[in-house]
Amino acid sequence: MESSACRPTAGSFFGCYLINSVTRKQTTYVGFTCNPGRRIRQHNGEIKAGARKTRRWRPWKMIVCVWGFPNKIAALQFEWAWQRPAVSRLSRDAVADLSYCRVTKWGRQKRRTVVQNLEVVFRMLKCQPWARMPLQVHFLDAEAYETLLPRLQTATEIPTHIKIVHGGFDDLPVNLKGSQAKPTAKQPVGRPPKVPRAKKAAAAAAAKADDTSMDARVGGEVETSANGRVTTHMNVFFLHVVWSLEMDLDI
């Protein structure tokens, strides 16, 4: 019975892949990815973030991708064991009879060809804990699937629930939206949103123009009002003078 810890997370893709140099057939590279189509473009220098070890011997082509791991940690453990099968405690017994998997006297793993890497990965799939995971071996290279796979006896000895298929990058259930989504900037709580300097200058100029027009209107009203009051006072004073003269002259 499959445990819940071995089931992949919904909407996630974690895979380990094998690529081969087109210009140098004996050169291979094993890695981890969440998006194989994007990863091969990085290795070929089409987009940034490619591995340093694959800058030489471009272009590269992806041979196979093993996916269906329950989480990223499990996939990275599989990648590390695939790169160093004679060092990993999970796979060293399975590859003990393979001379090309032995480490050198300096403690380094020997380089392996495409066929040798495929032999290693099929042996690893018979080991625990990978033998009980719902994995799938997806061949992306038609030549390797048609000519190299039939030569590997170990490919027929893996658990029956692990499927071996051939297809393209579009056939892989990669969550493109989740792998390429960019995080949105959040405005800190309690702070007003930032306003560009150009908008600030335009708002200040508009406010100044409104103040000037308001001052003009208010000033005109004040001046008109003051003139009205002066005129009224002058009329009252003139009438008072005329009335005084009439009284003195007794007109």
Image (cartoon, rainbow, N blue to C red):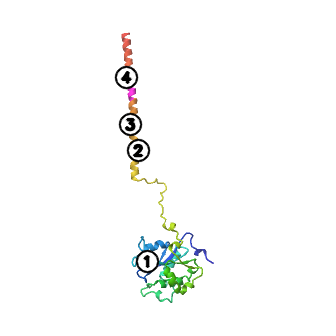
The residue labelled by disc 3 is 216
SS state under label 1? strand
Residue type at numbered disc 1: Trp
Residue type at numbered disc 2: Ala
Distance from the alpha carbon under mark 4 to that under mark 2: 40 Å
User: In the image, is residue 199 above or below residue 166?
Assistant: above
Q: Residues within 10 Å of mark 1 (few under 14, many from 20)?
A: many
**Mark 3 against mark 1, which lies toward the viewer?**
1
Front residue (pair 201, 230): 201
In the rendered structure, find residue 243 and report the number of the disc placed on it: none
Front residue (pair 243, 117): 117
- Quadrant of the image occupied by residue 162: bottom right
User: In the image, is residue 191 above or below residue 173?
Assistant: above
Please report contact status of discs 2 and 3: CB closer than 8 Å, yes or no: no
The residue labelled by disc 4 is 234
In the image, is 73 to the left or to the right of 54? right
In the rendered structure, find residue 60 and report the number of the disc placed on it: 1
SS state under label 3? helix
The residue labelled by disc 2 is 207
Coordinates of residue 155 in the picture (x, y in percent): 55, 84
**Mark 1 against mark 4, which lies toward the viewer?**
1
Distance from the alpha carbon under mark 1 to that under mark 4: 103 Å
Residue type at numbered disc 4: Met
Q: Quadrant of the C terminus?
A: top left
Residue 27 forms part of the magenta stretch: no
Q: Which residues are magenta?
A: 226-231
Visible residue check, residue 75: yes
Please report contact status of discs 3 and 4: CB closer than 8 Å, yes or no: no
